[in-house]
Image (cartoon, coloured by chain):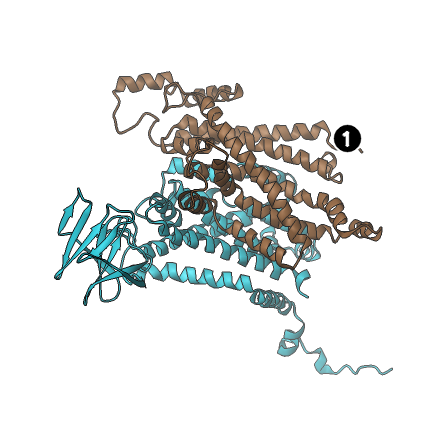
C-alpha cells in the first residue's frame, strides 16, 4: 500500500485553482438540477406546445394592436357584422359583390379581396320584399321574400364563387363594425394583464405570507392560517363580485379585486413547503451561523420551494384569466368599448342566431390559452419531479 | 374502533365554532362593503323628493347609526331573516332565495350526480386501460373539459344542440330535455377534473402493498382494482366534492343567465346590476353558510371512507 504523496501545491487555496473550484462546489449542483428540469421540460411535447402558444399570445397582445391599422374602439356602422371569409358573386368584369343575408346588405369586394364598401340599394320594394342595385348596366336584385334570400343578376339566379378570406378584416367585424382581430388581440392584453396581476399578488403576498406563517410556526402560524381558512371558504368569484359592486365595473377593479384576495392558495402551498424544509440541516446550519430569519426565508427556504411555487403559479394564472373573462361575460368586468374575451363572447351570444361564427374566435382564444397554461403546468410538474426522471 | 371515538364532540364543536366565526366575518365584510358603496340604495336617475327619500330611509332603518343597523341586521340573520329587498317592494330576500333555490338545487344536484356518475367511471376506464386508446381518449376529453370555460361550453352547445339541431329547448326547464344543456355545461369542468383525479389516484393506490397482497391471494385484477383499490382512491375525489359544490354555485351565475333559468345565481347577478344591496348581502351570506355546511359534510364523509383518519387526536 503506497501512501499518496502530499505535494505543497495541493495545499494551495482553491481560489488560485479555478478548475478545482468549479468541479466540487454546490452552485454547480444547483445548476445541474435546473438544467435537468429544463431538458425534461423541453422533451415534454404538450408543455412545449403550450409554451410556444403563450409566447405567441404575448407577442400578439403586445405588438398586434400597435401594428393593426384599426383601433379596438373605432366603429364603422356601414361595415358591421362582416364575416372573416365570404363567397363573392361576379357582377361584371371588375365588380364582385358579397351579400350579407342576415342584414340584407351588399358589399363591394375591393382589389385586395377585402369587403370595404357598402353598396346602397337604388330602389327598395318593401311590399314585394326586394332590393335592387344598378351596377354598371346590370340590375342586381335581392329577393328576401324567400328563405334564404336569393340574389339575381339581370333576372338570372347568381352563382357564388369559392370561399375567400376577407382581407380587410381577417376575423370579420362585430355589430358596430369594429375589427374583431384587433379586439381579439386587445382582449389578450387584458387577459395577460390580469395574469400579471395574479403573478404579482401571488409572489408578493402569497409567497411571503405562506413563508412567514410556515417559518414562524406556533401561534403566529395558527392565527395566519385561520385567516387564510376564512378567506378560502368563500369562492373567489364571490369576493371579486363583491369588490366590483363597491369599486364599479372596470378593468382596474378586476385587477384590484384579484390582487386583494388571489393569494390564498399560494400561501397554503408555500407554508406546506416551508414546514417540510425548515427541519433540514442546512437551515439549522444557517441559523447557527447567525443568519437572520428573513435571510433564512429568502435565501435558503424559498429558493428550495421554487419548483412547487412555479407549478402552483401556472395553475393559478389560467384561473385568474378565467375569472376575468367570466366576470366580463356576466357584465361585471371590463366596460365597453374595451374588449375582453369574456365581453367578446357575450357580444357574440347576442347575435348567435344570425352570425354564429362570431362566437368562434373568443371561444377558441380563451380555450387555447387555458389549455396552454394547463399543459405547461403539467409539464413543469413532471419535469420538477425527480422520481419521474428515468 | 367505531367512528364515535374517532370523532369526539370537541372536534365537531370546534368546527362549528370556526364556521360561525367565518360566517360572522363574511357578514361583517359584506355589510362593510355595502356601506362603503358610494350613493345610497335610493339614489337613481329619477330624483326622489327629499321627504320621500327620508321616509324610505326611515322605513328601512337607514337613518339609524351604522352600528345600530349592523346589530339589527345581525339579529335578523340569527333569526334567519335576511330582510326586505330594496328594489322589489314587498319581496323579502328570504323569498327570493327560496324561489331560486328550487331551480338551482335541481340543476346543481343533477350536475353533482353527473360529476360522480360519469367522471368516476371515466377515470376508472382510463386507469384500467392505461396507455391504450380508451385512456388516451378519456384524458383528451378531460383536458378539453378542464380548459374550455363553462360559459363557452354553454354557448357553443346552445348554438349546436338548441339552435342548429333543435334537439333541446334554448331556454327554460319545461321538460326533461331542458335540463340536458345546463347540467352538461355546469358539470363539464368537474367531470373532467374528477376523471383525471380518479385515474391518477387509482393508479397510485394500485402501487400499495395491500393491493399486492390481494393480488397474491389470487384475486383477479379487476376485482382487486374495483373492490380494494377504488374505495381508497376515492378519498381525494371526495375531498374535491366540497369545492365542486362551490363551483357549481358560482357556475350557476353564468349558466342560469345563458339558459334563462330563474335560479339563485340569476337573482344574484340581477341584484348586483340592480344594486339591490340587501339582496346582494343576503345571497352572499346564504352562499357562505351553505358552502361551509357542505365542506363540513365532506369532512364527515372523508372520515367514514378512510378509517385511518382521526380528527380527534390531530393536536
Which quarter shows the N terminus of chain A? bottom right
In this view of the protein, which residue sits in the foreground, A353 or A182?
A: A353
Query: Which residue is drawn at the image coordinates 57% and 45% (left, top)?
Result: B191
Answer with left or right where residue B80 lies relative to residue B37: right
Front residue of this view, candidates A314 and A75: A75
Residue A29 to residue B64: above or below: below
Secondary element type, mark 1: helix
Instruction: State the residue in front, A288 or A62.
Output: A62
Q: Residue furthest front?
A: A156
Q: Where is residue A242 drawn, in percent x and y?
A: 43, 35
State which quadrant residue A346 falls in: top left
Chain A colour is cyan
Q: How many labels were placed on the picture?
A: 1
Percent coordinates x, y for residue A387 in the rendering: 68, 61
- Which residue is at a point 13% across and 62% down the rendered structure image? A136
Q: Position of residue A46 (x, y in %)?
A: 54, 62
The quadrant of the image that shows the C terminus of chain A is bottom right
Q: Residues within 10 Å of mark 1 (few under 14, many from 20)?
A: few
Quarter of the image where one finds residue A380: bottom right
Q: Dot 1 falls on which chain?
A: B
Residue B183 image point, x, y percent:
51, 39
Left of A336 or right of it: where is A263?
right
- The residue pinned by badge 1 equals B5
Point 25% across, 26% down: residue: B46
The hue used for chain B is: brown
- Is residue B6 shown to the viewer in this render? yes
Whether residue A295 is visible, yes or no, is no
Amino acid at each position: 500500500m503506497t501512501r499518496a504523496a502530499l505535494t505543497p501545491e495541493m495545499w494551495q487555496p482553491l481560489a488560485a485553482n479555478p478548475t478545482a473550484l468549479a468541479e466540487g462546489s454546490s452552485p454547480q449542483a444547483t445548476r445541474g438540477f435546473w438544467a435537468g428540469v429544463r431538458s425534461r421540460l423541453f422533451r415534454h411535447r404538450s408543455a412545449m406546445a403550450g409554451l410556444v402558444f403563450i409566447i405567441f399570445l404575448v407577442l400578439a397582445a403586445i405588438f398586434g394592436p400597435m401594428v393593426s391599422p384599426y383601433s379596438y374602439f373605432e366603429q364603422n356602422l356601414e361595415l358591421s357584422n362582416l364575416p372573416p371569409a365570404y363567397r363573392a358573386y361576379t357582377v361584371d368584369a371588375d365588380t364582385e359583390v358579397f351579400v350579407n343575408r342576415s342584414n340584407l346588405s351588399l358589399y363591394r369586394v375591393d382589389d385586395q379581396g377585402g369587403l370595404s364598401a357598402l353598396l346602397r340599394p337604388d330602389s327598395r320594394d318593401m311590399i314585394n320584399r326586394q332590393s335592387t342595385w344598378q351596377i354598371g348596366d346590370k340590375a342586381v336584385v335581392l329577393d328576401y321574400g324567400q328563405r334564404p334570400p336569393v340574389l339575381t343578376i339581370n333576372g338570372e339566379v347568381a352563382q357564388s364563387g369559392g370561399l375567400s378570406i376577407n382581407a380587410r378584416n381577417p376575423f370579420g367585424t362585430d355589430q358596430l363594425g369594429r375589427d374583431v382581430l384587433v379586439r381579439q388581440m386587445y382582449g389578450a392584453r387584458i387577459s395577460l394583464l390580469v395574469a400579471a396581476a395574479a403573478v404579482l399578488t401571488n409572489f408578493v403576498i402569497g409567497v411571503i405570507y405562506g413563508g412567514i406563517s410556515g417559518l414562524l410556526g406556533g401561534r403566529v402560524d395558527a392565527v395566519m392560517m385561520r385567516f387564510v381558512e376564512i378567506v378560502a371558504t368563500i369562492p373567489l368569484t364571490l369576493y371579486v363580485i363583491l369588490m366590483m359592486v363597491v369599486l364599479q365595473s372596470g378593468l382596474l377593479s378586476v385587477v384590484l379585486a384579484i390582487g386583494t384576495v388571489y393569494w390564498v392558495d399560494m400561501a397554503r402551498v408555500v407554508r406546506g413547503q416551508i414546514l417540510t424544509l425548515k427541519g433540514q440541516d442546512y437551515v439549522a446550519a444557517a441559523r447557527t451561523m447567525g443568519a437572520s430569519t428573513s435571510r433564512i426565508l429568502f435565501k435558503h427556504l424559498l429558493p428550495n420551494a421554487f419548483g412547487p411555487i412555479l407549478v402552483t403559479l401556472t395553475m393559478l394564472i389560467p384561473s385568474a384569466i378565467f375569472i376575468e373573462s367570466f366576470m366580463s361575460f356576466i357584465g361585471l368586468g371590463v366596460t365597453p368599448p374595451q374588449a375582453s374575451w369574456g365581453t367578446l363572447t357575450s357580444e357574440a351570444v347576442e347575435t348567435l342566431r344570425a352570425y354564429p361564427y362570431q362566437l368562434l374566435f373568443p371561444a377558441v382564444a380563451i380555450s387555447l390559452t387555458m389549455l396552454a397554461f394547463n399543459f405547461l403546468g403539467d409539464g413543469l410538474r413532471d419535469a420538477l419531479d425527480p422520481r419521474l426522471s428515468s | 374502533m367505531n367512528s364515535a371515538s374517532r370523532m369526539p364532540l370537541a372536534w365537531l364543536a370546534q368546527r362549528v365554532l370556526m364556521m360561525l366565526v367565518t360566517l360572522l366575518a363574511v357578514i361583517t365584510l359584506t355589510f362593510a362593503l355595502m356601506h362603503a358603496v358610494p350613493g345610497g340604495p335610493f339614489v337613481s336617475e329619477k330624483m326622489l323628493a327629499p321627504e320621500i327619500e327620508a321616509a324610505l330611509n326611515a322605513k328601512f332603518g337607514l337613518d339609524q347609526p351604522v352600528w345600530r343597523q349592523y346589530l339589527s341586521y345581525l339579529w335578523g340573520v340569527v333569526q334567519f331573516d335576511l330582510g326586505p329587498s330594496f328594489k322589489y317592494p314587498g319581496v323579502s330576500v328570504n323569498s327570493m332565495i327560496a324561489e331560486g333555490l328550487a331551480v338551482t338545487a335541481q340543476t346543481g344536484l343533477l350536475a353533482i350526480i353527473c360529476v360522480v356518475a360519469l367522471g368516476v367511471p371515466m377515470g376508472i376506464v382510463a386507469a384500467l386501460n392505461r396507455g391504450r386508446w380508451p385512456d388516451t381518449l378519456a384524458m383528451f376529453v378531460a383536458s378539453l373539459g378542464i380548459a374550455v370555460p363553462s360559459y363557452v361550453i354553454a354557448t357553443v352547445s346552445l348554438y349546436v344542440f338548441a339552435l342548429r339541431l333543435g334537439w333541446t329547448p334554448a331556454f327554460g326547464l319545461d321538460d326533461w330535455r331542458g335540463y340536458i344543456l345546463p347540467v352538461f355545461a355546469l358539470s363539464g369542468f368537474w367531470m373532467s377534473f374528477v376523471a383525471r383525479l380518479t385515474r391518477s389516484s387509482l393508479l397510485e393506490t394500485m402501487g400499495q402493498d395491500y393491493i399486492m397482497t390481494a393480488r397474491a391471494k389470487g384475486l383477479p385484477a379487476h376485482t382487486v382494482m374495483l373492490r380494494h383499490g377504488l374505495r381508497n382512491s376515492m378519498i381525494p375525489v371526495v375531498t374535491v366534492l366540497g369545492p365542486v359544490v362551490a363551483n357549481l354555485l358560482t357556475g350557476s351565475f353564468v349558466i342560469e343567465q345563458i339558459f334563462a333559468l330563474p335560479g339563485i345565481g340569476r337573482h344574484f347577478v340581477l341584484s348586483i346590476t340592480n344594486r339591490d344591496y340587501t339582496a346582494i348581502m343576503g345571497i352572499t351570506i346564504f352562499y357562505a353558510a351553505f358552502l361551509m355546511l357542505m365542506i363540513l359534510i365532506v369532512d364527515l364523509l372523508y372520515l367514514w371512507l378512510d378509517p385511518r383518519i382521526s380528527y380527534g387526536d390531530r393536536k
